[in-house]
Amino acid sequence: MNEFNLQRIAAMEAAFDRTEAAVRALMQALDEYETVKVDIDRLTDYLESGAWREDFEMDEAGFVPTDLKRGVLSEDALYNLLGDIVSLHEQMQEICGD
């Protein structure tokens, strides 16, 4: 065994460690993402059904209590989140080669 073999083994071990950590993290993230799939569908329906617009207008008119957390009613947050999800799906398809 020469120095080249040792360097190659060390480089492959480092690649293995990085890949294993990334795969495990992605698997965990995908498991978590799967648990919120129902929420994603609900948020999509909320925006597309017109219910979001109704709630937004009620908030703008002052009918929603100011102490109620309502970030979902900001004009861009929900739209941007759903757009990020579309981008995520496209990225996953690119990575997987489909």
Image: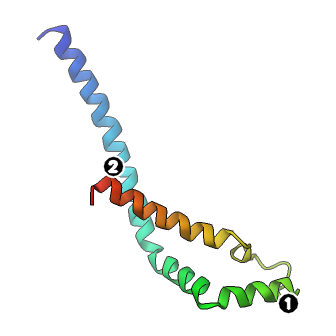
Is residue 81 found left or right of 63 in the rendered image?
left
Taking the spot 35% from the left edge, 37% from the top edge, the residue there is 18
Q: Closer to the observer: label 2 or label 1?
A: 1
Which quadrant is home to the C terminus? bottom left
**Spatial distance from mark 2 to mark 1, Cα to Cα?**
47 Å
Q: Secondary structure at mark 2?
A: helix
Q: Which residue is tagged 2?
A: 23
Given the image, on which type of amino acid does mark 1 rest?
Phe
Image mark for residue 6 = none
Q: Name the quadrant containing residue 15.
A: top left
Residue 1 against residue 47 in the figure, above or below: above
Residue 11 against residue 40 in the figure, above or below: above
Taking the spot 67% from the left edge, 69% from the top edge, the residue there is 77
Is residue 14 found left or right of 48 in the rendered image?
left
Taking the spot 85% from the left edge, 90% from the top edge, the residue there is 63
Q: Which residue is tagged 1?
A: 63
Badge 2: how crowded within 10 Å, few (<14), some, or many (20+)? few
Taking the spot 14% from the left edge, 8% from the top edge, the residue there is 2
Given the image, on which type of amino acid does mark 2 rest?
Val
Residue 43 against residue 63 in the figure, above or below: above
Residue 76 drawn at (x, y percent): 69, 69
Residue 5 drawn at (x, y percent): 17, 16
Q: Name the quadrant containing residue 59.
A: bottom right
Is residue 71 found left or right of 46 in the rendered image?
right
**Which residue extends farthest top?**
2
Residue 61 drawn at (x, y percent): 87, 87
Badge 1: how crowded within 10 Å, few (<14), some, or many (20+)? few
Which quadrant is home to the N terminus? top left
